[in-house]
Image (spheres, rainbow, N blue to C red):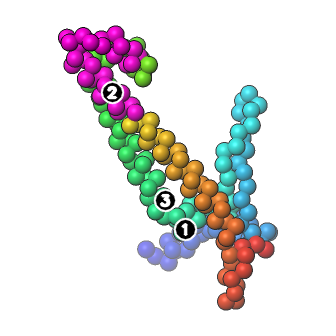
Amino acid sequence: MGKYDVYQHLMDYWASTMQDDCYLVADDGWKAETYRIIETDKKGKVKDKGWTCDLVPRPLVVARYFPQDQINIDELNQNLEEVTATIVEFEEDQSAEEGVLSDFDKVNKGSVGARLKEIKGDKDAADEAKILNRWLELNAAEADLKKQLKEAEAALDTKAYKQYAKLTVFRHGIRTPFSG
């Protein structure tokens, strides 16, 4: 990499990242202020989409103070993706011409439960019941992982939001609150 390449890389980084941050600091000082992200949908309904901070982005605070929480969330996401992929594959296998799910208009908890009630006690449908119960197990696992993920993300969001009040600036060997 030549000198010009290094210079160009620095200028690209300045234009894409540093410039806005430097202007924020020059204009407002070292204030890491959070604010809510409010959106209005097409029907005029106002929704709170969480919070953000322009000067110190949330991912930086999470990476510095709560890395294990983020690792746990990443693992939950990975587990959810695996279960979802298993469900998709299972449904594809069982939706073939002779598959148990081939007659379903829509495969969901209600339709599977209804079919299980229909065949309850029918010894000839034991294999079908086993397959339907397996689908219910996978569906329950997916729902549980989604719930765990939502709760973990909400907990991390709250922790990170509270951490902003504790941020400080290190100036001349003295730690001061993170404000102008």
Q: Which mark is residue 65?
A: 1
> Furthest residue to the front?
121
Task: Evaluate whether residue 19 shows in this view.
Answer: no
Overall secondary structure of the magenta stretch?
Answer: helix
Task: Evaluate whether residue 168 shows in this view.
Answer: yes
Residue 156 vs 15, above or below: the answer is: above
Q: In which image quadrant can residue 177 be found?
A: bottom right
Question: What residue span does the magenta drawing correspond to?
Answer: 111-140
Residue 30 in the figure: left or right of residue 89: right
Q: Position of residue 94 (x, y in %)?
A: 27, 21
**SS at mark 3 in the image:** helix
| Residue positioned 40% across, 33% down in the render | 140
| Residue positioned 58% across, 50% down in the render | 154
Q: Kindly identify which residue carries mark 3.
A: 69
Q: Kindly identify which residue carries mark 2.
A: 135
Characterize the local packing of mark 3: few (<14), some (14-19) or many (20 or more) Cα atoms within 10 angstroms. some
Q: In which image quadrant can residue 42 be found?
A: top right
Mark 1: amino acid: Tyr
In which quadrant of the rendered image does the C terminus lie?
bottom right
